[in-house]
Image: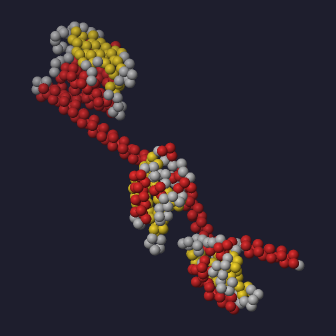
Amino acid sequence: MDEVRITRHDDLTRFFDHAPIGFSLLDSELRYIRINAALAEINGRSKEDHIGRFQHELVPEVDDIISRVQRRVIEGGAVSTGHRVLVETPAHPGVMREFEVDYFPVPNGEDGNHLGCCVYESSESTSLIDALERETARSRELAEKVNFFLASLAPDGIVREVNRPALDVAGLRSSDVRGVPFWDCPWWNYDDVVRAAMRSRVEDAQAGELQRFELAAKTAHDGLIDLDVQLTPLMDEKGQVCEIVTSGVDITQQRRAERQREIHVAELQHRVKNIFSNVQSLMRMIAGQSDDLDDFKAKFDDRLVALARANDALLKTEWSDMPVRDLISMELAPYVEGNKSALKISGPPCNVPERSASMIGLAIHELATNAAKYGALSRAGGTVDITLTADDADMMTSFTWRERGGPPIQPSGNHGVRSGFGSVLLERIVPGTMELNARIERQPEGLTYRLE
């Protein structure tokens, strides 16, 4: 019989401890004698924390509601069931939960009663808690998967939680930053100025001010990224900051594109100024060599079109170094079409700097125009041989234009390249632009122009 009693006692103990509903046993002064895991979880404390302590000490809000009924049961010795209690519990702060509670007297063997309590949550409340926990789990999953920096700070700026992307970008573990002042974390402590800037912003957020700013964060392998950072203070019911939510979006590519755009705009402004300067120089030189307005217009229009072609070609190279052969083909195509043997180009492929390409193109145009009017390209059988040399960087180091088969010219005459704008361009402007020397040789068999 004793063995049966022991077995039953063990069974009841296991049932009490592992039942899915809450059980507790309190003395006549409402001190906890025993409590099971389910009710301890509802109260937000361990079972051991309850034993020997008063109910009003551990759950004062609940005690205010139920203590009078409990004392009646202890004193009167009658069971009282079906009491509904609506309360916020420590286990789920911010959520009102509904419980049904039954009270029954338990004789203590000393002509008095202890109090037995049976607590179970209503189905509506349970559903609400389940939904809240699912939503919390989903929020955590989303925080881990979003592609931006997300952290939770305590009111004093200490890191509570950080999402996975923020840790991964700097090669960190959660333990490296949890419990550390946010400004002392590796994203910011690489530089005293950056660290101080973040600390100042956190202090402003602690005062309840929303903060939005940009700051460079350190990444793994000593890299840096530009972050658009926001610190959002959250307030409790008393209007005090209870949490600071930190978010950051990587804007490195955006800022890099903006800086590149600024460079391009500056380059474009510089090039436009150069184009206007070239046009102005053309206008002045041609005006000084023109007989009248019609003569000026014809000469100016011709050179302006050539200058425009050179700039169009530069635009196609995105204003980088210009292949010389492209300039030659562009200017001589109208004169050798249908007679490819009239033009021969020898030497390696080479380039001229972007700053010099317009003037080189204009020089080739000047030589081609004069050859078509007075030189080798003005009659059948005439040829133009162009020889190029280049350095190891494929930049042009010399340019030689040699005409053969055209009308004979006198060494002392101007036939072949007229004095005035053409000679100024070929002998002074282009050499100055290329930092080379130029020479025009007028020989009976044809004109030779050397730039070397």
**Count of labels shown?**
0
**Based on the displayed image, in which of its 4 quarters is residue 415 positioned?**
top left
**Left or right side of 353 for 59:** right
Q: Is residue 338 visible to us here? A: no
**Left or right side of 319 for 243:** right
Vertical arrangement, residue 388 with respect to residue 287, above or below: above
Residue at left 27%, top 37%?
270
Residue at left 45%, top 49%?
190
Q: Between 180 and 334, which is closer to the camera in this rendering? A: 180
Vertical arrangement, residue 239 with respect to residue 54, above or below: above
**Left or right side of 266 for 158:** right
Q: Between 202 and 321, which is closer to the camera in this rendering? A: 202
Vertical arrangement, residue 167 with respect to residue 96, above or below: above
- The outermost residue toward the right is 1
Q: Position of residue 301 (x, y in %)?
A: 20, 29
**Based on the displayed image, in which of its 4 quarters is residue 54 positioned?**
bottom right
Q: Which image quarter is the N terminus in? A: bottom right
Q: Position of residue 294 (x, y in %)?
A: 13, 27
